[in-house]
Amino acid sequence: MSASIQNSHEAYRLEIDQGQLIVHTYGRWNLDTIKSIDRALQADLRAIGYGKVKTSGEDYGVDDSEFGGVVFDFKELIRIDTAGAFILTRTIGCHDGMCRMWRVRNANPGQQILLTAAAHASAGMEVPPPKPWYEPLSRLGEGFLNGLRETYETIAFFGQFSVILFKMLLRPQRIRWKSVFSHIEKVGLDALPIVVVLSFFIGCVLAFMGSDLLEAFGAKVFVVDLVGLAVLREFAVLITAILMAGRSNSAFTAEIGSMKMRQEIDAMTVIGLNTGETLVAPRALACLVSAPILTFFAMVAGLLGGMLVTWSQGISPILFTARITEVVSINHFWVGMVKAPVFAMVIAIIGCRQGLAVGGSVESLGRRTTTSVVQAIFAIILLDAMFAMLFLQMDV
Amino acid sequence: MHNVNYDKLDFSVPVEAIGVRSQFGSNVINENLNLQLKSGEILGVVGGSGSGKSVLLNTLLGLKSPDGGVVNIFGHDRKHITADELKYFENRVGVLFQGGALFSSLTVRENIMVPMRLHTNLPVPLMRELADMKLDMVGLPMTAATLNPSDLSGGMRKRAGLARALALDPRILFLDEPTAGLDPVGATAFDELIVQLREALGLTIFMVTHDLDTLFATCDRVAVLVDKHIAIADTLDNVVKYDHPWVAEYFGGPRSRAAGLATQNKGIE
């Protein structure tokens, strides 16, 4: 029996003839038009019951078994592109997971190839599995484990590098002095203005806040003790370290990371250059030299800032310096200074390790640079707290 | 959608350079360069290193404006086209850069979807399906869809780049050294892919290449860029006979003879 159901759309007409679905196509089937065609076609196919497997016999008006095959008629088609071909084969050829026999008539060889390629693609497609409900939890766990692994690897890297550094110090001719000095210029000298300015302002703010508060107790002159203690013990070295983490540590990661991306690191290894000696050691030594010097200048600038503000509050510079030498012992200076090389080492090690851990993509370079700065600042604050407790116990 | 005068479009000569001159400072790269790309053909451009092939490609693509002469695209002077027309042309031109030039922060599938997102209003699930289809067309497995470009091999990256170039079903495809850096098997497969795609999609292909095998296997016409201009653009047989020292050296070398022999043998089979 030959039934003929016609569902019309400006781009196609569906016809059922002797158990075959005939799709007459009109006009243009391309990226600009397929959006509406796709929707209409799916609805019309559903309306004629195409693709539904017969369940109990009265599901839809047309029994599925009627559709022996599909014929695409391209007689009146103007143009079809891959998107149009895909819609045709995906929606009709493989509807509801069932793939049927299809053929095309009145098509040129190019269109034939196009349809075949489209059918091949739509047959092999698979839907990605949805994310399980515990996905956020597993990500949390992964993040925690990652943190542990990072810590472990940073410490391991520090150990490896310590051995290299120790060997180099035994044979100083192996140190690349040229590289060391070039890095001292970048890490130390170039950072000097910003470190000094920032520290100066911190000293000013401390003095302002302190004198305001202490005046209420009638103990205004103690602001000198406050500025001296805070700047010497904590602020100078912290400002220096945090600025180094922001400036130099990120630069180390980016420099070494892009070398890694361009296989320069691999080339060095093959030639026999030790990356620890050639890349990490000069940077670490530069940091070790620069950090105490920068810290010293930061201390001077901070005290100057404090002195300037207290002068405006009625404490003369002569009184300020006299009181500093009288009440602030040299111990406080050394407490600040002794932390500088430790922080310097942490900054250099984290920066270089993250740089060497960069993978092949630009994205990983960006991620590693961020991680590097965050880790370095985190480590600095943590170590500073540990130092504070240590010095408290030691009574210095 | 586009405010473009379709009557003025000339599809028979999609890209044309007339008397183009390009220079950097006083260094003239291309001088009085004439070249026509005819609809439906595969045109290969050859020339020595530093002969200005890449500059020519950039000029035709509009990345660099010519310092003299005219570049026509679909019969329009590139200098005087409106924004709407430019958008229309962008939709009809696909480019495969030498290294693939995939966006490294996106997965392969997302890379292919970028032009679709920009130039069409298709729903995202449909875009995803179309992207997967392009992947299949260029011969990449579905598993590559979710990978990052850095996880792909050089050949796969080129195929993914080709899939992105084909995302909007362009009329013209520009290929910059499509087979450079591929192993011979991969390069042959790529040549076949290009010819197949031309058949299926009716593409017009402009190809800059060094690869003699590719020239012999795919190109309908070959243009030779020497002495700052296109000396000859003709079928391979005629180009080989052309009387110029560089051409003689290029096509007379052992590599060329081997490539020619391989093509002949294929014909006999």
Image (tube, coloured by chain):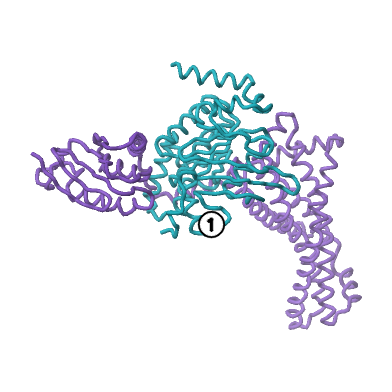
Q: Residue at x 49, y 56 (%)?
A: B85
| Residue A259, image x, y percentages | 69, 41
Decide if residue A127 is on the left or right side of residue A179.
left
Q: Amino acid at mark 1?
A: Ile
Decide if residue B95 is on the left or right side of residue A391.
left
In the picture, residue A128 is in which quadrant? Answer: top left
| Quadrant housing the N terminus of chain A | top left
Front-lying residue, B196 or B232:
B232
Q: Residue at x 53, y 26 (%)?
A: B216
| Quadrant housing the C terminus of chain A | bottom right
Front-lying residue, A144 or A106:
A106
Q: Chain A's shade in the image?
A: purple
Q: Chain of mark 1?
A: B
Residue A144 appears in the picture as rendered: yes
Front-lying residue, A9 or B10:
B10
Decide if residue B126 is on the left or right side of residue B153.
left
Decide if residue B17 is on the left or right side of residue A230.
left
Front-lying residue, A361 or B26:
B26
Few, some or many residues within 10 Å of mark 1 (<14, 14–19, 20+)? some
Q: Where does label 1 land, which residue?
A: B81
| Residue A239, image x, y percentages | 74, 61
Q: Chain B's shade in the image?
A: cyan
Is residue A79 placed above or below A264 in the rendered structure?
Answer: below
| Residue A172, image x, y percentages | 86, 37
Q: Residue at x 27, y 37 (%)?
A: A106
Q: How many numbered circles are shown?
A: 1
